[in-house]
Amino acid sequence: MESDGLSPDRYSRVIQQLRQIRADLILLTEKYVETHGFNNMNFDPPGGSATMGSGSWAEMATEERLLANISAYMVLEKQLMQVIAEQGESLLEEESDLHEGLRGMLMKVSALRAQLEHLGGTMGLKECAGDTDEVDRPSGSVFEMKVRGYHLLNELSVWAVRSLRDLRKLQREREKLVSQAEASAESSEL
């Protein structure tokens, strides 16, 4: 086990969790598009929390990226709660499987955020002080609410991919540190 309390398995479990979320998001987005009839529509993505430029992202330390991931999932989790409330009000009874899919995704995103917070805590990172206020219910037509839900699912997909890359990088860095520490310990025993 690593000296900082993080086993390689913990990283692998979070990475697997992210892969599953990404796969589920693909299916959920397809279901969302089909249910709402967005099949042939092209939407310009709004500027969301996943829009941080790749240049500034590349300059961040891995630990900073982890904190940015945690913050993003806090916001995305709240936005997903809002979408679920909006969709619950407008979905028909025969569309309940989409609503269940959205609620299932909320549980997965909440669990992921908790795992990322735990990783950050065991690494000694300062706890993320996310905005604890509820997301305001924006006004708009039912169509606009549906489009916001679509954009949110896409943003979650972007963050899932970004988080996978960040966790893999963090895992490699931690494995390298552990190998170096083990080599150092072996050489000092000689």
Image (spheres, rainbow, N blue to C red):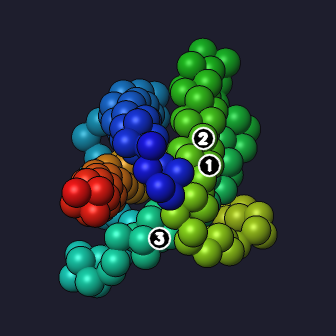
Residue at x 66% of width, y 41% of height: 84
| Nearer to the camera, 132 or 139 | 132
Q: Are marks 2 and 1 in contact (CB under 8 Å)?
A: yes
- Label 1: few (<14), some (14–19) or many (≥20) C-alpha neighbours in 10 Å: some
The percent position of residue 83, horizontal first and vertical second, equals 62, 48
Could you say whether the residue bearing mark 3 is in a helix, strand or loop?
helix
The percent position of residue 122, horizontal first and vertical second, equals 57, 58
The percent position of residue 159, horizontal first and vertical second, equals 38, 56
- Answer yes or no: is residue 86 visible: no
Residue 142 higher or lower than 108, as above or below: below
Residue position for label 1: 114
Sequence-wise, which precedes: disc 1 or disc 3? 3
- Label 3: few (<14), some (14–19) or many (≥20) C-alpha neighbours in 10 Å: some
The percent position of residue 142, horizontal first and vertical second, equals 60, 48
Residue at x 59% of width, y 29% of height: 104
Residue at x 43% of width, y 75% of height: 64
Three-letter code for the amino acid on which mark 2 is drawn: Ala
Residue position for label 2: 111
| Nearer to the camera, 83 or 39 | 83
Q: Quadrant of the N terminus?
A: top left
Residue position for label 3: 68
| Nearer to the camera, 27 or 64 | 64
- Label 2: few (<14), some (14–19) or many (≥20) C-alpha neighbours in 10 Å: some
| Alpha-carbon span between mark 2 and mark 3 | 17 Å
Three-letter code for the amino acid on which mark 1 is drawn: Ala
On screen, residue 44 versus residue 50, left or right, reads left
